[in-house]
Amino acid sequence: MSSYQAPRSPRDEIDGMLYFPRLCDKIRIHSEGKLDKDYIENLGGGMDLWTCQFLGVDYNELRVKVLSGLSDEAALTWAKENGTPRDENELAWWNQYMQTRGFRDDMADRLAFRKEEANWGDRDDIVTFFDFIDVDENRIE
């Protein structure tokens, strides 16, 4: 039996910010050796990187803070205090950007490829990467 553990949904949010709980979860699960190998190559890249860039913090510095025992809330507070200040309009933009990645944007071809690779090319309900991730991790059937 695999010791693999799926990270939280990208739709989970903390203090109004999508994806951040998943980022923290992936860091913790990886440190416990329970993150599937398919995720390891992209740790700190992709949506992890975009999230850190939006917050204005270095992924490795955030990783150290999370692994020191900070809760998701405390890690986000640290990021806000040490990164780029963002107002609620920027956060609203960010959330919209993240939850629609893959829908008629520069990542649409990549999403189509991933759907075909997973034999889900006929799944019209998978229109964003958030959808893909939640189906792939069995949160949506």
Image (cartoon, helix red, strand yellow):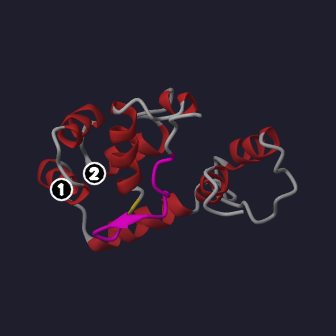
The furthest residue to the front: 1
Could you say which is closer to the camera, residue 13 or residue 36?
36
Q: Nearer the viewer, residue 105 or 21?
A: 21
Label annotation for residue 37: none
Q: Give the range drawn in magenta.
A: 6-17
* Amino acid type, label 1: Lys
Assign a secondary structure to mark 1.
helix
Q: How far apart are marks 2 and 1 (CA)?
A: 7 Å
The answer to whether mark 2 and mark 1 are in CB contact below 8 A is yes
The residue carrying mark 1 is: 80
User: Residue 45 location in percent, x, y?
Assistant: 45, 35
Image quadrant of residue 29? top left
The residue sitting at 70% across, 50% down in the picture is 108
Amino acid residing under circle 2: Leu
Residue drawn where x is 19% and y is 58% of the image? 85
- Mark 2 packing: few (<14 Cα in 10 Å), some, or many (20+)? some
Which badge, 2 or 1, comes first in the chain's sequence? Answer: 2
Residue at the left extreme, as displayed: 81
Q: Residue at x 49, y 57 (%)?
A: 10
> Which quadrant is the N terminus positioned in?
top right
Q: Toward the viewer: 51 or 64?
A: 64
Give the residue pinned by disc 2.
Answer: 55
Counting from the top left corner in percent of width and height, residue 17 is at: 35, 65
Tell me: residue 84, above or below residue 58: below
x then y, percent, for residue 24: 33, 47
| Residue 134 in the figure: left or right of residue 19 | right
- Residue neighbourhood size for the residue with mark 1, other residues' Cα within 10 Å, grouped as few (<14), some (14–19), many (≥20): some
Give the residue displayed 41% in from the left and 52% down from the top: 22
